Amino acid sequence: MDGRIQTDTAKGGMRVLNRDVIKYIAMFTMLLNHTGHVFLTRGTFLYEILEDIGFFTAPVMCFFMVEGYAYTRSKVRYGLRLFLFAVLSQLPFTLAFGQRGLNMIYTLFCCFLILVVMERVSSPALQAGCVLLLILATVNSDWPIVAPLLTFLLCRNAGDRRKQAVSFGVVYLLFAVLNTQNYMFGEQREWTAYAVIHAAFSGVGILVAAVVVLVFYNGERAKKGRHFSKWFFYLFYPVHLLVLYWIK
């Protein structure tokens, strides 16, 4: 299984962003999303803008998880790190958002387990059943269903940029449909036209993420500060949630 996007022989052109730069952008957009959720009133224009910008982050994390899984030196340590930070992040997540659901790193841990299943379970029927159960295991977490499904599709289509683009498109449509249902039948109960338009725009972050990783990503890591970046991306999630909670 090779999750790395195949890069052109010439690294020039539009492929100007390395993995760490894209991840830092994703951390910033996540911060904007969470700032809106913690401090702004749901449904206001600025809240909606910050929320939608933040939808860039999860698809990027799923993409790099698929890539990283294929190249990590120890999948066991990789999985343990995700599990540990999922546990450590739960209290900050609950304090910041006042929710009973599980945090995004838990969702990413389920995504990791999907990759393990796809690598090690040879029976198609058993593999499909395990993947389905892991997708359903995220129903009560951040980015439910959508993130694990994207991880599964990106892994299935690894190495084929066109099919991975279709994978992002499929997940965008699912995300828009779920948001439409939320606005029509959930708390908002908005009229249908508004629900459809709003849902369509809310998923633009997923499409932007697809363009960034499939068009502008050069397949490389930063040459300096790799150790710092590795731990920064793990620590940023629980730490920034605690900081937002304390400020609030």
Image: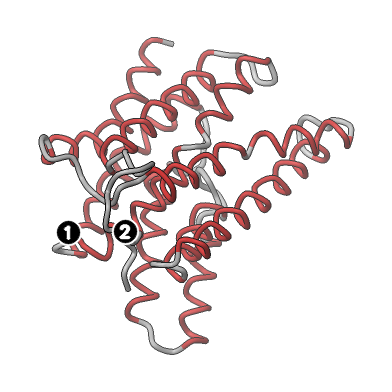
**Observer-nearest residue: 93 or 77?**
77
Residue 52 in picture, x, y percent from top left? 58, 30
Residue 152 higher or lower than 198, as above or below: below
**Observer-nearest residue: 7 or 91?**
7
Residue 47 higher or lower than 247, as above or below: below
In the figure, is residue 210 to the left or right of 227? right
Q: At 41% from the left edge and 52% from the top edge, which residue is drawn?
A: 62
C-alpha gap between disc 1 and disc 2: 16 Å
Secondary structure beneath dot 2 equals: helix
Mark 1, other Cα within 10 Å: few <14 / some 14–19 / many ≥20: few
State the residue position of label 2.
Answer: 67
First along the sequence among labels 1 and 2: 2
Q: At 31% from the left edge and 69% from the top edge, which residue is drawn?
A: 2
In the figure, is residue 163 to the left or right of 217? right
Residue 150 higher or lower than 130, as above or below: above
State the residue position of label 1.
Answer: 77
**Observer-nearest residue: 1 or 41?**
1
Q: At 26% from the left edge and 59% from the top edge, which residue is drawn?
A: 79
Instruction: State the colouring used for the structure image.
Output: secondary structure
Instruction: Give the quadrant of residue 228.
Output: top left
Asked whether disc 1 touches disc 2, contact meaning CB atoms under 8 Å apart, the reply is no
Residue 148 in picture, x, y percent from top left? 49, 58
Mark 2, other Cα within 10 Å: few <14 / some 14–19 / many ≥20: many
Instruction: Give the quadrant of residue 60.
Output: top left
Residue 5 in picture, x, y percent from top left? 35, 59
Secondary structure beneath dot 1 equals: helix
In the figure, is residue 2 to the left or right of 202? left
Q: At 62% from the left edge and 49% from the top edge, which residue is drawn?
A: 172
What amino acid is labelled 1 in the image? Arg
What amino acid is labelled 2 in the image? Glu
Q: Nearer the viewer, mark 1 or mark 2?
A: 2
Residue 216 in picture, x, y percent from top left? 39, 43
